[in-house]
Amino acid sequence: MTKRELITPAATKDLYLPVMAEITDVRSMTPLEKLFEIRLPGGAELGHRPGQFVEVSLFGVGEAPISISSSPTRKGAFELGIRKVGMLTEMIHRMQPGERIGIRGPFGSGFDMAKFKGRDVLVVAGGIGLVPLRSLINYVLDNRGDFGRLIICYGSKSDADLLFEDERRLWERDPRVEFHLTVDRGSPGWQGRTGVITTLIPGLDLDLPNTLACVCGPPVMYRFVLLALKSKRLPEENIYMSLERRMKCGVGKCGHCQINGSYVCQDGPVYHYPDIKALREAL
Amino acid sequence: MARFYLENGKVAAFIGHLQQQKTVYAPHRKGRNAFAFAPVDRPQDVVLDYPRTVSSIKRYFLPPREELLSFNLVENTCEQPVVAPLDAVFLGVHSYDVHAVLKLDHNFVSGNPERNYLTRRQGALIVGVGFTPDRFHFSGSVGVPAGDTTGCDLFLHPCEGGYALEALTPDGEGLVAGFPLPAHTAGLPAAAPFHQHIYVPQAKLKDVLAHGYDSEVWEEEAEKCTSCGTCNLVCPTCYCFDVEDAVDITVTRGSRERRWDGCLLRSFTEVAGGEVFREEPAARQRHRVFRKFKYISDETGEPWCVGCGRCTASCTAGISIVSIVNRLVNDHDAVKA
Amino acid sequence: MANKPRVGIFDFTGCEGCELNQLNFEDQLLDILEHVEIVEWREAMDGRAESLDIAFVEGALSTPDCIKRIHEIRRKSKVLVALGACAVQGGINALKNIRPIEQVREEVYGQDKYLFPTLPALPLSAVVKVDVNIRGCPMTQLEFLKVFTALVMGKAPVEPGNAVCTECKLKDNECVYEKGMICLGPVTRAGCDAQCPTFGQYCTGCRGLVPEPNVEAMEEILVAHGLSMDDARKKLQMFNANQLEGVS
């Protein structure tokens, strides 16, 4: 039973009140995805970890969870990669620099980067899964000495859907990055690799016990990537996954994001695989 | 603490005494065969002998619809409405509904404590009342006897000719002060029996539910279910909510409103783009029952169902949570025996 | 607002009650007219418009001429809103679809039946793309205002997908079944704020079935509460004949 003295609003925070932040830059990545640069009032830091999310709101339209795409090492502003999938994101896509949107957060677990120190980092990103993982990638690049190899496997439906073109080209050329790219179906003239993302994994040369895999992509992808990683004999405890659910309130109250007994907005969206292995609704 | 005798003829006057101190909420008749909590206007309209109310007193702490923000679209600004504390007495609350409030307290204090709920809940006093279990009550099976006084400031034990009024807290004593009543010295009558039971000790439920994850019962019950969500919405320990923005006709102002939601509803896990993460009605049925007997229970060691029987009594399809759990118990015992 | 959206209001087979309900916006009518310019509305004005931002269309499609006209309206309108049960589901008109069409024609027009070509009563969505539904018989002002303000803001309105029961429970209503009556609330789309059950009636299902409805379960509930299976089907068909027969 909760003690009576705890039933008090004294120690509560403004759980549902957004901070009004300014859109400082908008870049179109594909017809469906745009990258928004956002500055909090007074240039305050968001104070996030890679893998966390914010609730973005437009008054009169609503609120939705959006992954943070920039690394906390890049100061002064943060970035959100937003796909146009519903009413709210469609309205956000129409917004211009100088306009203001509501931000709550950061929320969720995120990647505990201390656990990644000295380890090889394998990023497995399917489609829009690259958006949250880009935060991790840039964190590693900005603290390059703290980590081992950085291996990126990025798969997309087609070459027209590829995200972060400028950065991708940097990663391709950067000797500190091992970058592998594939598309399910290439348009005519596509010179790169064709095939689903799991086809990238068998050929990887991994230092097994030392490699930590971070996986994010569409719901259907996880089981197959997991199988591919397991057949590489990557230990389960070396796998992290970022999952999508309907994180409506972001503060562990509204119930929508639950996977069995776990609130994704509190325990996730980044999960250590052994922690969700037994959750039947997870993958 | 003290126990007084409140004869039936003095109940209305006692309610009047409470009204002089605070706003009093109590059960009233609603419609043809239903009861609902409402602010007391005339003490003689209060019904203390009732089977159950449509919804619990939860609605006063977590309102079914509540403005979280009001916003100005022209200025692009918002503010939080001021939530007023409830200076109130809840009179005639059954033990299971008091337990339900204590469980909600846990949910709204844990993790990120929520101001709106706690502001309203803080200072609310509760006067419990005993009840005669009907064919849907089973709170005795989840550790809540009809005469359980946990969480109450005062409790009305039904007895010959009236009530034994038990003071349980200094606040409760304060409510009685100034209303002269004789002491109640006789023993309390034995509690009436329950007609519905979950046949398993609570400690074993954890195993039973883990074993029942893939039971056929989910699909069988889902076939009868229209996914209307009533079971969630009448549940006194359900607290899930949805949030939606509305604008007024001038399109210059509006509000962000939350309202009760339920995991049995198909839309509950739907994300932008149309993916529904708990698409199968059977999976939703299981989630509802697991929310009551497993997920929070594994952490707290208590069932999160209080045995009020509302979900079953309100289900037009006749789906019974007691039958579901007992079926899981039987299946578990059959295999493990 | 410099360029007010140009709005047209049209009707097909129906009682025109939804349109009349628009004229009944006594408190809000002036606010509504602040936002839009009504350029075509047979019930209240003369003339025709070349192009429209929003077309509100009432009634079901039930003659070859209806089909021609709805295509014209669709062509000249940016947003097409189906207004009321007839336009959204075919409404009560669709009851004729569960009987042979020749029999219906003869019953209604007798020996003149050859003068009146008729088709099964269809929802607008069976013929053209519908952008927004405003449901109900008649449509509720509550939902009209919600959709209207959304369109003025330039956003797509969200259509409620839960059952009417959810709104009843939020209002702490006594369940209609508790009163010894039957009700289609468990499978009918919310959005009306459970008006009928709140005011002592039962839900007739005018707003259409919820997505993925469990119709068999609803029939069983009706039968368990005293209806014959035949009567249970008829109750459900009243507003949902097309949806039950697979016409969206």
Image (spheres, coloured by chain):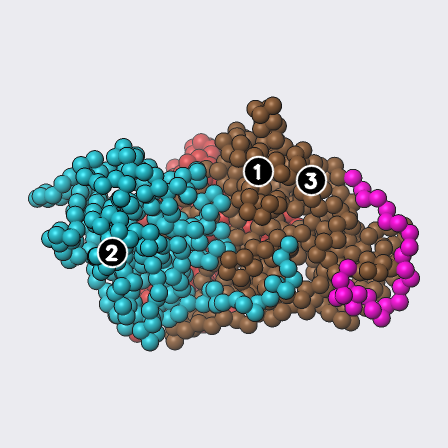
Q: What amino acid is at disc 2?
A: Asp
User: Residue C136: within the magenta?
Assistant: no
Say which chain is cyan: A
Label 3, secondary structure: give it: helix
Reading the chain from its start, which is encountered first: label 3 or label 1?
A: 3
Rendered position, C199 above or below A157: below
User: Residue B185: within the magenta?
Assistant: yes
Q: Residue C217: in sight, yes or no?
A: no
* Mark 2 and mark 1 on one chain: no
The residue carrying mark 2 is A146
The mark found on residue B55 in the picture is: none
The residue carrying mark 3 is B141
Label 1, secondary structure: give it: helix
The residue carrying mark 1 is B206
Distance in Å between CA atoms under marks 3 and 2? 56 Å
Assign the N terminus of chain C to one quadrant of the image.
bottom left
Say which chain is red: C
Q: Magenta segment, which residues? A: B168-193
Residue A60: x and y, percent?
Answer: 41, 65
Rendered position, B199 above or below A107: above
Residue at 15% x, 58% y is A166
Distance in Å between CA atoms under marks 3 and 1? 15 Å
Q: Chain of mark 2?
A: A
Label 2, secondary structure: give it: helix
